[in-house]
């Protein structure tokens, strides 16, 4: 597995280890020759040296090579013998090794211990505190994937798939001996090169076709590629090698991203020329694992360059022109943690990546973060069976077919890292924003509730400062849901949404009316109490002024609102009398509102309708109760413009 972790050399492999007294073992370890180093450390332990340093390095040598059973053995002894004398990172690694052997109950305990011992500002510690999401939550994620192991997999590392002209380019150690038979000490496997495989019609299997891009192949590692949308430019990861292997001042050979251009031969075949090192590479840190946006304008990659939050982070640059790029930008703490974020794959809907800095099932898990306007949502773990207790990474997908490929070193595979095809069941998500239905301003702090068709609450969230909300629960396709938004001083609103039959994001804007506004058959009215007038009078009483001040308040808060005033009476008294009285009262009401500072042109009209618009059957000569007559005596403030 670490053949591809090397693809971002984890230089930092967290230098929490101390040197031991065995220079030979330490030299092998420092060169990342973990297979041989582990053997020597275990001989030392067998001979009685169980010092903290030896136990740390014995555990690490296995941990970095994903031998979790052995790593767990030595970490358990380390924490038993030196519980108060080790870095919090070892509590984390022990918890990860417990997940690697599927002891999730004990792993949960040690994750919490790690979170408590680590500083509170550490994002990884916060993610592993399990205060909001627990291991049980991850284990209970609804399965979305069906995986199949590919024919191209070998006993060694096969990983790093990428679509190319309807086929698959991938990284492998197989068939690399035509250049160099030496094995790489990290995991005792040959160096990596690129192959081209033919994807079957069902997209469930891949068969080997030929070595890919021999023009860019060296005697060291080439892996993890991406292509421009027209597939005429390749971006690939390689050792810092240009005829000579270069190392930094610590003796580490870092990784770099290179580009090359497709040049068509006379026979129609393609050769890759004009190999160019990207300008943001460095001899002092690693850059690798590229992914190009669908519009070809952005290049995402992984690095441990200055400005990195954790061991390795995901960065992005704008592709400006021929070998011209903007300065690298860290994707920030929404995506990156103090752990490892690796293997990004960007689509026009989401970014997919592997991480061990968020709570997961063990090792690297695959996460999905949907985005809009370059703003990424909180990542979601994609759950089992895509993720396992080992490392799962290198996820790519055709979102139109919901089919793709992912890599894993799970025990059920053929070798070290294997590539699996998958089909993802239809997956929907719901997001949106809450807004003031009158001003259209976004509303923050609204409680937004998602319910299923049985009216059972699935999830609650609070709208953000820009009014946006998102639900992280598993949302079914082709299914009805209701969404309710509520906030003080607003009338709650419920919307029904029927999710589509294909995967995607269903966006649901929800407008809230101010509490003083009511809707009736599409008509907006300002909702206040009864406006009382003295018998045969039209002057504004004190108690009526209190109610009319609510109209003034709303029109002040919403300076674009225009209203019309309608005044009505019951059927008692003569028709013409009621018509004149109601008209005087409407105009008196208008004058009062204007006297409180509302511009006259914001009152479109003020008209009395007498008994011509009764709300019930209490017309002339029909016996009715006082309560029935009261329904017809009303003043209405109808909003005509907002």
Image (cartoon, helix red, strand yellow):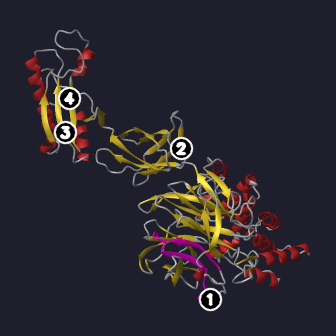
Question: For the residues marked 3 and 4, what is the alpha-carbon distance in whole angstroms?
Answer: 12 Å
Image quadrant in which the N terminus is located: bottom right
* SS at badge 4: strand
Question: For the residues marked 1 and 2, what is the alpha-carbon distance in whole angstroms?
Answer: 52 Å
Mark 3 crowdedness (10 Å alpha carbons): few <14, some 14-19, many ≥20: many
Task: Determine if the magenta segment contains residue 414.
Answer: no
Question: For the residues marked 3 and 1, what is the alpha-carbon distance in whole angstroms?
Answer: 76 Å
* SS at badge 2: loop
Q: Where is 514 relative to 95, above or below?
A: above
The magenta stretch spans which residues?
Answer: 221-245
- Is there any visible trace of residue 339 in the rendered image? no
Mark 1 crowdedness (10 Å alpha carbons): few <14, some 14-19, many ≥20: some
Image quadrant in which the C terminus is located: top left
Q: Residue 635 carries which label?
A: 4
Q: Which residue is found at the position 23% from the left and 17% from the top? A: 629
Kindly identify which residue carries mark 2.
476
Mark 4 crowdedness (10 Å alpha carbons): few <14, some 14-19, many ≥20: many
Kindly identify which residue carries mark 3.
563
Q: Which residue is found at the position 50% from the left and 55% from the top? A: 400
Question: Is residue 597 found left or right of 511 in the rendered image?
Answer: left
Q: Where is 2 relative to 436, above or below?
A: below
Check contact, mark 4 vs mark 2: CB within 8 A: no
Q: Which residue lies furthest to the right in this view?
A: 47
């Amino acid at each position: 597995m670490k053949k591809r972790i090397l693809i971002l050399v984890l230089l930092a492999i967290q230098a929490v280890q101390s040197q031991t007294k065995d220079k030979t073992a330490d030299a092998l370890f420092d060169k990342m020759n973990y297979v041989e180093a582990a053997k020597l450390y275990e001989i030392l332990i067998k001979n009685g040296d169980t010092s903290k340093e030896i136990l740390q390095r014995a555990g690490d040598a296995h941990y970095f090579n994903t031998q979790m059973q052995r790593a767990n053995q030595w970490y358990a002894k380390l924490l038993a013998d030196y519980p108060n004398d080790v870095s919090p990172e070892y509590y984390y690694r022990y918890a990860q090794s417990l997940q690697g052997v599927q002891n999730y109950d004990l792993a949960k305990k040690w994750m919490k211990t790690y979170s408590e011992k680590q500083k509170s500002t550490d994002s990884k510690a916060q993610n592993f505190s399990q205060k909001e999401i627990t291991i049980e939550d991850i284990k209970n994620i609804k399965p979305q994937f069906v995986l199949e192991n590919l024919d191209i997999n070998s006993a060694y590392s096969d990983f790093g798939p990428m679509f190319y002209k309807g086929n698959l380019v991938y990284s492998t150690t197989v068939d690399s001996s035509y250049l160099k038979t030496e094995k790489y000490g990290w995991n005792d496997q040959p160096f990596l090169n690129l192959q081209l495989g033919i994807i079957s019609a069902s997209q469930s299997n891949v068969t080997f076709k030929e070595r890919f891009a021999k023009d860019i192949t060296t005697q060291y590692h080439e892996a993890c590629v991406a292509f421009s949308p027209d597939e005429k430019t390749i971006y690939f990861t390689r050792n810092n090698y240009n005829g000579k292997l270069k190392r930094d001042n610590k003796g580490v050979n870092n990784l770099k991203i290179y580009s090359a251009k497709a040049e068509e031969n006379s026979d129609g075949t393609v050769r890759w020329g004009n190999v160019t090192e990207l300008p943001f590479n460095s001899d002092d840190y690693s850059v690798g694992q590229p992914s190009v946006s669908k519009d070809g304008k952005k290049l995402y990659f992984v690095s441990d360059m200055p400005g990195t939050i954790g061991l390795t982070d995901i960065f992005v640059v704008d592709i400006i022109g021929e070998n011209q790029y903007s300065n690298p930008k860290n994707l920030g703490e929404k995506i990156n943690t103090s752990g490892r974020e690796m293997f990004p794959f960007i689509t026009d809907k989401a970014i997919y990546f592997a991480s061990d800095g968020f709570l997961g099932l063990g090792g690297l898990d695959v996460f999905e973060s949907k985005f809009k306007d370059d703003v990424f949502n909180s990542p979601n773990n994609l759950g089992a069976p895509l993720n396992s207790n080992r490392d799962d990474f290198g996820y790519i997908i055709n979102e139109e077919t919901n089919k793709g490929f992912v890599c894993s070193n799970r025990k059920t595979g053929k070798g070290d890292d294997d590539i699996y095809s998958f089909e993802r069941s239809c997956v929907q998500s719901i997001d949106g924003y809450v807004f003031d239905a009158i001003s259209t301003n976004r509303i923050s702090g609204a409680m937004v509730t998602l319910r299923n068709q049985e009216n059972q609450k699935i999830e609650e969230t609070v709208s953000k400062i820009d009014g946006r909300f998102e639900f992280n629960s598993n949302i079914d396709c082709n299914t009805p849901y209701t969404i309710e938004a509520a906030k003080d001083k607003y009338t709650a609103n419920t919307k029904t949404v029927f999710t589509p039959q294909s995967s995607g994001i269903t966006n649901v804007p929800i407008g809230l009316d101010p509490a003083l506004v009511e809707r009736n058959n599409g008509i907006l009215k300002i909702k206040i109490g009864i406006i009382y007038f003295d018998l045969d009078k039209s002057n504004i009483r004190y108690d009526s002024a209190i109610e009319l001040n609510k109209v003034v308040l709303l029109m002040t808060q919403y300076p674009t609102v225009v209203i019309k005033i309608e005044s009505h009476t019951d059927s008692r008294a003569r028709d013409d009398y009621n018509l004149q009285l109601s008209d005087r009262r409407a105009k008196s009401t208008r004058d009062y509102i204007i006297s409180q500072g509302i511009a006259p042109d914001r009152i479109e009209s003020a008209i009395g309708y007498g008994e011509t618009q009764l709300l019930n059957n209490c017309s002339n000569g029909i016996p009715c109760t006082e309560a029935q007559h009261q329904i017809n005596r009303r003043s209405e403030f109808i909003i005509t413009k907002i």
